[in-house]
Image (cartoon, rainbow, N blue to C red):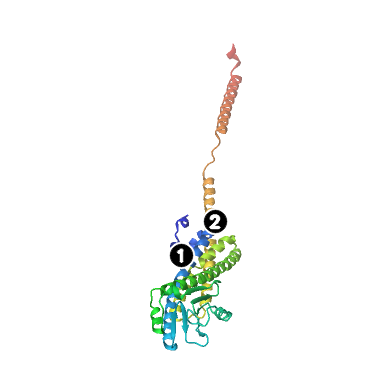
Amino acid sequence: MEEKNMNFFKKIWTSIKDFEKYEEFAAEKLSKAIKYILLITLIFTTIISISYTYKFHTVLQDIKDYINTNFEEISLKEGNLKVSQNEPIIIENEDNVVPIIIVDTLSNEVNEQYLDKAKLYNTGIVFLSDRAVVLSNLVKEEQSIKYSDITNSEIANKEELIRLFSNSNIYYVYLVFFMTIFIYLYIIYLTTNLIDAFVLGVLGYLFARVVRLRLKFKATFNIGIYALTLPVILSLIYTLINTFTGFTIEYFQWMYTTISYIYVAVAILMIKTEITNQKIQLMRLEQIQQEIKKQEPEEEPEDKKEDKKDKEKDKEKNEKNKKDKQNDEEAPEGSNA
């Protein structure tokens, strides 16, 4: 089949534009369909994580400006950060990629209050005395970045600290953030996509029964996976636009769901049409064969032909004998004198 030679990117294009190929997608192995959803989710998550990491870079620049404006004294000595503060500083903004930032250089542990705060958001950062901690709802282990890993130099004032944000070691911070957000998003998106594919598979199975098409659940589940292709790509585009511009579409999730449902329904109807056309062609072929048989004379078997010839010969012989007998009877008596 052609589908066996179809690479990943060709599958993406085909699943968007060619409903006729969904019959091949339905017939393929479940492992191939699962591999497809894993790969497309991986690409989606990687692009989104890169965009969030870039946004995180802009957040760090905002932190640098915040420190420059609001902190009078700040230093980093022997890997310990000290800020002129009497109580923890909590910066909350749910529109940022990092919606909560906590500065508490009076402690070197993340207390329960900070964890409870982080649970209200997807992710957060806590700046402690010896390290910065990236918090996430799904990643159980804390992702810590020690200040000593970023720089071995001592920072006597905030001007030197601000210069640290331009240090080459800051890329280590970006890497840790990228890995944390990537793991978080991949778990979220993969779980969501598999649940959506399962729901589409169930609805597709029921719809197939309604249109009197017998499909296994594996087939409708495969169709559900490939039907998510266009919605996932649209979701990627929308997320990128939303991240960098803040533009929102109120009923985007409804549109996402509706498109996938339409793909499943149309794919099943196309499969139904294809099977119906195949049946019609078979019926026409049988009809033509029957008409040809009626027009052709039936050939007798060879043994019957030979029997018929023997009977004809016997019949001719009998008729000849009968004729000879009649001639004998009709001859005049004087002929024997």
Q: Position of residue 140 (x, y in %)?
A: 56, 71
Q: Position of residue 283 (x, y in %)?
A: 54, 54
Disc nearest the viewer among 2 and 1:
1
Q: Are marks 2 and 1 in contact (CB under 8 Å)?
A: no
Marks 2 and 1, the one that precedes in the sequence:
1
The one nearer the camera, 32 or 58, is 58
Q: What amino acid is found at the position of numbered circle 1 in the picture?
A: Ile
Mark 1, secondary structure of its residue: helix
Say which residue label 2 marks: 279
The residue sitting at the front extreme is: 78
The one nearer the camera, 288 or 108, is 108
Give residue 12's mark.
1
| Quadrant location, the C terminus | top right
Which quarter of the picture shows residue 264? bottom right
Badge 1: residue crowd in 10 Å (few <14, some 14–19, many ≥20): some
Q: What amino acid is found at the position of numbered circle 2 in the picture?
A: Lys
Count of marks, rendered view: 2
Q: Residue at x 53, y 81 (%)?
A: 107
Q: Residue at x 56, y 29 (%)?
A: 312
